[in-house]
Amino acid sequence: MGRRIGDEEKEMKRKKTTGKTSLGARIIEGMEEAVAIMRGEADARKFRIHIPAEIDTREIRKKLDLTQKEFAVRYRIPVATLRDWEQGRRVPDAPARALIAAIREAPDAVRRALARAAA
């Protein structure tokens, strides 16, 4: 993915106003966009969501200090599927990777959203 026209100017402006590096400025910009979407101030359809090609489900589960069964129940994933992912017998598809990435970034928010959806 290459840079778009005007990216250089935006980058210079970001660095000048925030004092952040390119990566830091992009992170801040991304968070500001996420907040705007959550507040209804931006059209979420205009933003692409990155879904990782690979994701380490076991590492994420262990960081949350959950057993396979606890993780599976909490996030509505069949425990056999979770075991297959962790043991390398299967690979999560794109929607599953998106869910796991969301869990990695905001586990409590995902848990609450799933609980509300089940109610």
Image: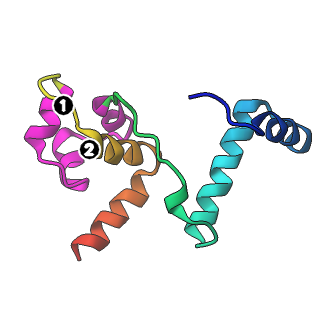
Q: Nearer the viewer, mark 2 or mark 1?
A: 2
In the image, residue 53 above or below residue 35 = above
User: Type of residue at label 2?
Assistant: Ala
Decide whether residue 109 is among the magenta residues: no
User: Type of residue at label 1?
Assistant: Trp
Q: Give percent across and percent down for residue 1.
A: 56, 28
Q: Determine which residue is flagged by label 1.
A: 85
Residue 101 versus residue 3: which sits nearer the camera? 3
Q: Give percent across and percent down for residue 42.
A: 61, 66
**Label 1, residues with CA under 10 Å away: few <14, some 14-19, many ≥20:** some
Decide whether residue 62 is among the magenta residues: yes
Secondary structure, magenta segment, majority class: helix
Disc 2, SS: helix
Circle 2/circle 1 CB separation < 8 Å:
yes
Disc 1, SS: helix
Left or right: 23 as drawn, with respect to 14:
left
In the image, residue 73 above or below residue 11 = below
Residue farthest to the left?
80
Q: Which residues are magenta?
A: 57-86
Q: Report which quarter residue 98 is drawn in.
A: top left
**Tag 1 or tag 2, which sits nearer the N-term?**
1
Q: How is the image coloured?
A: rainbow
Q: Report which quarter residue 40 is drawn in.
A: bottom right
Left or right: 13 as drawn, with respect to 38:
right
Q: Determine which residue is flagged by label 2.
A: 96
Identify the residue at image location x=68%, y=36%: 4
